[in-house]
């Protein structure tokens, strides 16, 4: 920590909820970003060189080259978010820099948004909204905006971690039949409690389900896990939902198939190239696009901040941060 200062200098790259920033300012020597200005690489390097702790967000790319310029003072990257694929954790570890995240607090919010997207796509909510906002509705018609019934549909969940299980509980309440593919099968009692059907073969699950929902992290093993070949296994009436990581789906292949009517619809909150969604997706009426809103609740954002503060406080006290990420688990 800074010489002559018992409190760590904590640099925060984006504006956080006011209660979180107030607590940080009270507990640490906090350098905040009240204008929420997006920082460039030069700004990040300068922050890292004068700080003990960096609090980045998903919009900050902390790669090996950036870390090489950090200098000796930086010892902790307390990420504001659960995903850390924008941080080179291995390179940080080589320089003696710990990395923490904020797991577990966004499960319910992301599961809620997943169900919202399933309903929005299958019931054509955005198409109806567009007509109403344009003042083009000329009255009720028996065949207008016909969508599909949620109950009875087969939901295939790709990745059955905390969020996948939360989605399964919600889907079951809507009368959906829940299937899943995971690296490891859940215990039999957990499957029975959630009413799950396990598929060892992802290909077979894709061919037999009506809605596919992605809930896996982005790793080298999951990059384009839903490849063009696998997307072609889907029924023409199938819907694809992604509130996890955009890189898991071959976005160009998905776009081509949606435009050709080979997939019925998609609900996307994440994109393969960060905030740059494929522009051809924006013109499709059977696609619902959101700006990474899955975890965007006041409660969730504050809980994320509380986790960041606990991790920094543990570091400052010479203790192991509770959400320390081990490089070999990435």
Image: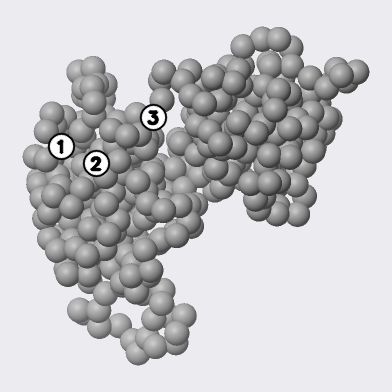
Looking at marks 3 and 1 on the same chain, the residue that comes earlier in the sequence is marked by 3
Expressed as whole percent of the image width and height from the top left, the position of residue 113 reads 42, 49
Expressed as whole percent of the image width and height from the top left, the position of residue 280 reads 33, 70
Note whether 80 is above or below 210 in the view shown. Answer: above
Residue identified by numbered label 1:
202
Give the distance between the C-alpha atoms of the residues marked 3 and 2, in whole angstroms: 20 Å
Q: Using residue 135 as the reference point, say whether residue 237 is left or right of it.
A: left
Q: Quadrant of the N terminus?
A: top right
Note whether 30 is above or below 154 in the view shown. Answer: above
Nearer mark to the viewer, of 2 and 1:
2
Nearer mark to the viewer, of 3 and 2:
2
Q: Using residue 5 as the reference point, say whether residue 207 is left or right of it.
A: left
Residue identified by numbered label 2:
225
Give the residue at the far right of this rendering: 4
Badge 1 element? helix
Tell me which residue sits at (87%, 19%) in the image. Answer: 3
Residue identified by numbered label 3:
162
Expressed as whole percent of the image width and height from the top left, the position of residue 211 reads 22, 50
Give the residue at the far top of this rendering: 319
Note whether 236 is above or below 23 in the view shown. Answer: below
Q: Quadrant of residue 107?
A: top left
Q: How would you rate the neighbour count of disc 2 (Cα within 10 Å): few for under 14, some for 14-19, many for 20 or more?
A: many
Expressed as whole percent of the image width and height from the top left, the position of residue 247 reads 35, 46
């Amino acid at each position: 920590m800074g010489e002559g200062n018992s409190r760590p200098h904590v640099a925060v790259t984006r504006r956080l909820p006011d209660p979180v920033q107030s607590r940080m300012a009270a507990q640490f020597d906090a350098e905040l970003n009240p204008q929420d200005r997006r920082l460039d690489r030069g700004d990040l390097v300068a922050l890292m060189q004068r700080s003990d702790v960096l609090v980045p967000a998903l919009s900050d790319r902390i790669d090996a080259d950036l870390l090489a310029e950090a200098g000796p003072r930086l010892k902790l990257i307390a990420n504001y978010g659960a995903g850390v694929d924008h941080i080179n954790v291995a390179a940080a570890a080589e320089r003696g820099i710990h990395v923490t995240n904020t797991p577990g607090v966004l499960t319910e919010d992301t599961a809620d948004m997943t169900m919202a997207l399933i309903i929005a796509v299958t019931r054509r909510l955005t198409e109806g909204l567009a007509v109403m906002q344009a003042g083009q509705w000329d009255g009720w018609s028996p065949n207008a905006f016909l969508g599909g019934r949620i109950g009875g549909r087969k939901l295939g969940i790709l990745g059955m971690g905390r969020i996948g299980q939360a989605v399964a509980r919600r889907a079951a309440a809507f009368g959906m039949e829940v299937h899943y593919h995971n690296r490891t099968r859940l215990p039999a009692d957990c499957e029975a409690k959630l009413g799950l059907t396990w598929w060892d073969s992802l290909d077979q699950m894709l061919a037999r389900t009506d809605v596919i929902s992605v809930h896996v992290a982005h790793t080298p093993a999951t990059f384009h896990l839903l490849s063009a070949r696998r997307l072609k296994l889907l029924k023409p009436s199938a819907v694809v939902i992604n509130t996890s990581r955009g890189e898991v789906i071959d976005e160009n292949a998905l776009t081509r198939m949606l435009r050709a009517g080979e997939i019925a619809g998609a609900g996307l909150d994440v994109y393969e190239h960060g905030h740059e969604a494929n522009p051809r997706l924006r013109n499709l009426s059977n696609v619902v696009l959101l700006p990474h809103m899955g975890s965007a609740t006041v409660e969730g954002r504050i809980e994320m901040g509380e986790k960041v503060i606990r991790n920094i406080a543990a570091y400052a006290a010479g203790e192991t941060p509770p959400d320390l990420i081990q490089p070999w688990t990435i």
